[in-house]
Amino acid sequence: MISPCSPSLEPQIPPPQTPASQAPIIPPPPLPPNLPELAFPPSPSSLQTRIPPPPPLPPPPPTTRFSPPHVFGLEKSQLLKEALERAGPVPRSREDVKRLLKLHKNRFRSDLQWILFCADLPSLIQEGPQCGLVALWMAGTLLAPRSGIPLERLVQVAMERGYTAQGEMFSVTDMGRLAQEALGCQAEVLYGGLGGPNRDHVLQHLVAGHPLLIPYDEDFNHEPCQRKGHKAHWAVSAGVLLGVQGMPSLSYEEDPELPGLFHPAPGTPRQPPSLPEEGSPGAVYLLAKQGKSWRYQLWDYDQVRDSNLQLTDFSPSRAADGREYVVPVGGVRAGLCGQALLLRPQDSGH
């Protein structure tokens, strides 16, 4: 919009003159004799010294095809900087699963065909006892991708509500309340463990592309172990690898690099496969991430189930370190044992 006070952008046309106001037309003088003929008159620019063109601009820097993981305390730790430089790109879920399948091919049953359901999660390296909130932050990218809620905000809300003292989370119920308030998502607390009647419910949740938060005991290589809750840790799963006897339909396509590995075909309705029976060992693997590594891991479902079911005691080393922790009434057994958190976007159905 142009202001009334702004100068007009249209060319100014002088008013027409009347014949009386025009000056008399005087013919030009005759040319002098023997004037040399010129094909083109010399232009003023040809009479000046030519200016060389500017040097070409340097080529743009190469674009990175990956986003580095978020690392808290990176600016203070040279060790973290060097580790990050050595780690290289953060792989996408499908590529990392294929790396794991190639690296540990003897772990996976050759009599089965494998279907991979996965969603990409960012990486975030935790600082201090924030593994649960880091797992929730990673899950939040699937639940509220446009909100971009920072981890600091999750910590702040958790502290204001009395769920944590320094980032630790020893209650699945409190984690669900925090997820609903901070991320505006649906949260369902699962009781009774990951096995039995809950197993199909969990697998269908992951096949649909929704995240699952799981407390477990962490081993030295970040995998699930059984330490009676002394190594209690949190992970987020946003994918599952299913071993099946036959493909359910043409809505899956085989991986061009790994025969026997199938992915949901893009642009086609997804038909869920028949889930492996609970008595089929080594047929279900969870694709998981946690806050001490920026790579994915594939965990045997039964191994995760068993680790989750034995979270009963508070770590003696934490009890003696002089720090304050928020532990629910009934301890670790009441807050974590046999429980998990299923999260969905607010507008999704069950």
Image: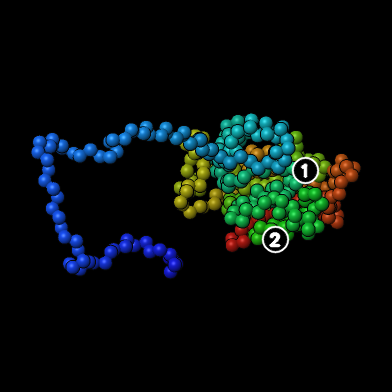
- Counting from the top left corner in percent of width and height, residue 167 is at 77, 49
Question: Could you tell me which secondary element the residue under label 1 belongs to?
Answer: loop
- Counting from the top left corner in percent of width and height, residue 203 is at 62, 50
Q: Which residue is mark 1?
A: 128
Farthest residue in the left direction?
Answer: 33
Number of numbered labels in the structure image: 2
Image position of 182 with respect to 122: above or below: below
- In-image side of 187 versus 30 (left or right): right
Residue 243 shows in this picture: no
Q: Which residue is mark 2?
A: 181
- Counting from the top left corner in percent of width and height, residue 17 is at 22, 66
Name the amino acid type tagged 2: Glu
Camera-side residue of 275 and 349: 349
The structure residue drawn at horizontal position 13% and vertical position 53%, both measured from the top left corner, is: 27
For the residues labelled 2 and 1, the Cα–Cα distance comes to 23 Å
Camera-side residue of 176 and 246: 176
